[in-house]
């Protein structure tokens, strides 16, 4: 029955509360999951205002499709978390139109972790991309989980920054979890699922339709304590996410930029409207009232990963070198300057990392992480 509910479009936490209220006083004990609740409440559904499409889906379930969903979820280790579950994210449950069910691939514990959303332009400047990575990495080290939407640009840079610092990150998709959009981020999605979570309110097979993404954005902000906008034009969708965050009572942060940069104008508009101006990650931690002691505790409690290459743990020199490469290309001379190691040592380690498949070399002698 729970999978059938996953195929009932538009079902929200508020609908679940209404159905639950309709069966209060019945002799049966309170259901612990949505499947049991709706099976028990069939007689009461006519008295509860559900979306027409959800009513139809519950009245005439597509059992063949539901069986396909079950097989796919089992094979891909995807979970369906409903609003009656203790694992449903508590912050999200209190926003308007919170989805009754969430599809999750990865670590369910991430959903209850303190989160900061980072969003911005799909076509940022290189400085904006680097800023997003650096903020995400620093905030991850402070114990925050970084939440974003897996899109090109600032979203991807934020996920990468969290992963590079061995932190947790959540990608909220505007498709079913069987489809990665954009497809170029398939490898990034796999890393996120391994060290965080992929999340969607949409059942498998849901394509990247345009209207899915504004709805996805309310989940990005709803999961989080606050939202940071790194770069955004005046007409950017990130400003819609910022408005949703404000409506949900979340803190909104924006990074200012050059008056000559059109991607700074959206951030400047947010600051004029009351968003907090941010110059460093500490500004955010101070505003959302996470003290240095709490940062340390969150950092100690978070699962940390030991960087490996080829199945073996890296020693300190290799870790320093990989951190120096980051997620941008860099020349041998640049890496020597960043690490303080000798050119002979850097060249030798790069050769080893290249043989291990951890580093690649591009035209012009530029090295990149793979």
Image (tube, rainbow, N blue to C red):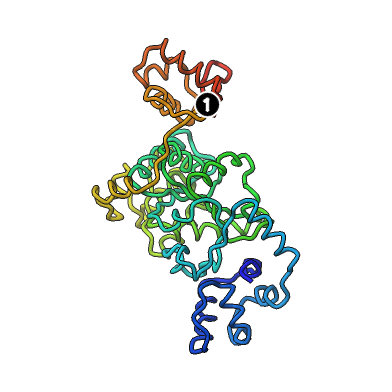
Looking at the picture, how far across and down is residue 243, in whole percent? 45, 60
Circle 1 residue: 358
Q: Nearer the viewer, residue 149 or 75?
A: 75
Q: Please state if 58 lies on the left or on the right of 332 as rendered.
A: right
Q: Quadrant of residue 10?
A: bottom right
Q: How many marks?
A: 1
Rendered location of residue 316, percent (x, y): 37, 25
Above or below, 351 relative to 183: above
Left/right of residue 35 with respect to residue 339 in the rendered view: right
Image quarter hosting the C terminus: top right
Q: Position of residue 187 (x, y in %)?
A: 58, 39
Q: Residue at (58%, 71%) from the top-left corner? A: 11
Tell me: residue 335, above or below residue 34.
above
- Looking at the picture, does residue 317 appear above or below residue 184? above
Nearer to the camera, 42 or 98 = 42
Q: Dot 1: what SS?
A: loop
Residue 223 located left or right of residue 282:
right
Q: Nearer the viewer, residue 235 or 160?
A: 160
Q: Residue at x 62, y 51 (%)?
A: 76
């Amino acid at each position: 029955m729970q999978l059938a509910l996953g195929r009932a479009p538009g079902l929200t936490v508020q609908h679940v509360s209404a159905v639950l209220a309709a069966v209060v006083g019945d002799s049966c004990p309170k259901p612990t999951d949505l499947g049991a609740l709706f099976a028990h409440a069939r007689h009461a559904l006519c008295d509860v205002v559900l979306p027409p499409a959800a009513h139809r889906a519950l009245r005439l379930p597509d059992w063949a499709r539901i069986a396909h969903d079950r097989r796919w979820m089992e094979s891909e280790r995807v979970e369906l978390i409903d609003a009656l579950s203790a694992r449903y994210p508590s912050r999200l449950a209190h926003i308007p139109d919170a989805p009754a069910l969430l599809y999750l691939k990865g670590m369910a514990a991430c959903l209850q972790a303190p989160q900061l959303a980072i969003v911005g332009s799909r076509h940022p400047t290189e400085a904006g991309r680097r800023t997003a990575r650096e903020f995400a990495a620093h905030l991850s080290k402070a114990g925050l989980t970084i939440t974003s939407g897996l899109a090109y640009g600032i979203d991807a840079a934020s996920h990468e920054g969290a992963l590079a610092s061995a932190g947790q990150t959540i990608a909220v998709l505007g498709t079913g979890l069987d489809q990665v959009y954009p497809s170029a981020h398939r490898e990034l999605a796999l890393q996120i699922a391994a060290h965080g979570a992929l999340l969607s309110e949409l059942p498998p097979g849901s394509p990247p339709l345009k209207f899915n993404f504004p709805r996805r954005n309310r989940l990005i902000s709803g999961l989080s304590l606050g939202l940071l906008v790194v770069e955004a034009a005046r007409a950017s969708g990130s400003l819609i996410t910022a408005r949703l965050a404000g409506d949900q009572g979340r803190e909104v942060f924006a990074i200012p930029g050059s008056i000559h940069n059109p991607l700074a104008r959206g951030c400047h508009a947010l600051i004029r409207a009351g968003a907090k101006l941010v110059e460093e990650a500490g500004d955010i931690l101070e505003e959302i009232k996470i003290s240095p002691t709490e940062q340390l505790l969150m950092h100690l409690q978070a699962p940390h990963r030991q960087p490996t290459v080829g199945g073996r743990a890296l020693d300190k020199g290799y870790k320093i070198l990989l951190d120096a490469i980051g997620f941008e290309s860099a020349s041998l001379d640049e890496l020597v300057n960043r690490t303080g190691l000798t050119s002979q040592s850097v060249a030798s380690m790069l050769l080893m990392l290249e043989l291990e498949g951890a580093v690649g070399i591009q035209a012009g002698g530029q090295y990149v992480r793979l």
